[in-house]
Amino acid sequence: MKQGLLIALEGIDGTGKSTQIKLLADYLRQKGCEVVVTREPTDGPWGRRIRELYKDRSSCTPEEELEMFINDRRDHVREVIEPALASGKIVLTDRYYFSTAAYQGAAGMDVDHIFACNRFAPQPDLVILLSMDPGTSIRRIAEIRGEKPNDFEQVDQLRQVAAIFDSFNHPCICRVPAEGSVSLVQERIRKHVDTLLRERNYPCGQ
Ligand SMILES: Nc1ncnc2c1ncn2[C@@H]1O[C@H](COP(=O)(O)OP(=O)(O)OP(=O)(O)O)[C@@H](O)[C@H]1O
Ligand SMILES: Cc1cn([C@H]2C[C@H](O)[C@@H](COP(=O)(O)O)O2)c(=O)[nH]c1=O
């Protein structure tokens, strides 16, 4: 049924996921792979409601917040991820259910319960987990991107999120240091992706 590959980029805010996913997509397309780049929260109805929360996270309970992320993912899996995988494409997603486990876990929900709620979602073939000290990532958001950190980007909160990300030991996870230049981080990511393509005999990776 599933013929493509699912690769998720994960990590705390400001680690460079959006920057790196674009470069990775270019690299894979140059090799001749068909690539779908997507993200969570999505741009669908649940994703738009979630983005409203960035301004005032206290407007819903942790349970309601978790439910919104799960609903958004159900739509994402059904409408984007499964069709692309079924047609043999490489799906690159900027965040997936590991973000839910880490962020909603840090907000007080049980991490095992969160993973159980996500059993409907296809397991990724590879998770690139970009790791960085939360103080540095917040500085990137504030100084380089020139934005005021939102309600999900508070340093104490991000420290808890980072600690939960650190605790994951799923075999699909490869940890990549996010410090260093954009091209150095990209080089680290490509090594893991090239290994995956080779191991799976994925056609464009030969
Ligand atoms: N290796 C790097 N060195 C310096 N700055 C970087 C690096 N990678 C990304 N940046 C800059 O840091 C900021 C955050 O990067 P980016 O938006 O890619 O991170 P992100 O992980 O997608 O963030 P978020 O999770 O908040 O969406 C951007 O301004 C980006 O240009
Ligand atoms: C998928 C997902 C995301 N979040 C949080 C993490 C970030 O703070 C925002 C998304 O911001 P981005 O700049 O678009 O990456 O949402 C979350 O709490 N739970 C999740 O499942």
Image (cartoon, rainbow, N blue to C red):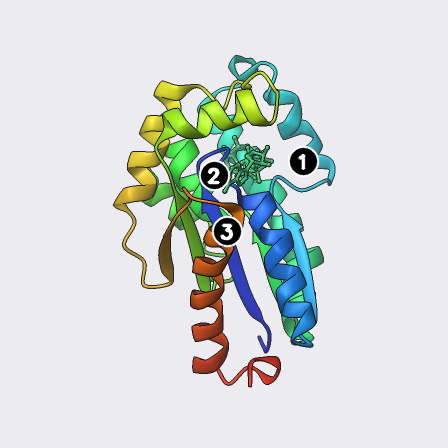
Q: Earlier in the sequence, mark 2 or mark 3?
A: 3
Q: Is residue 94 visible?
A: yes
Compared to 192, does 202 lie above or below?
below
Helix, strand or loop for disc 3: strand
Quadrant into which the N terminus falls: bottom right
What's under tag 1, amino acid-wise? Trp
Q: Residue 63: image x %, image y %?
A: 46, 28
Q: Residue 168: image x %, image y %?
A: 30, 49
Residue 15 disc label:
2
Helix, strand or loop for disc 2: loop
Q: Residue at x 49, y 33 (%)?
A: 13
| Contact, mark 1 vs mark 2 (Cβ under 8 Å) | no
Q: Is mark 3 within 8 Å of ligand 1?
A: yes
Dot in front, 1 or 2? 2
Position of 2 compared to 174: left or right?
right
In the depicted view, which residue is nearer to us: 103 or 9? 9
Q: Quadrant of residue 49?
A: top right
Dot in front, 2 or 3? 2
What's under tag 2, amino acid-wise? Thr
What residue is disc 3 on?
A: 9
Residue 173 disc label:
none
Q: Residue 126: image x %, image y %?
A: 45, 63
Decide: few, some or many residues near mark 2? Use Cα within 10 Å; few <14, some 14-19, many ≥20: many
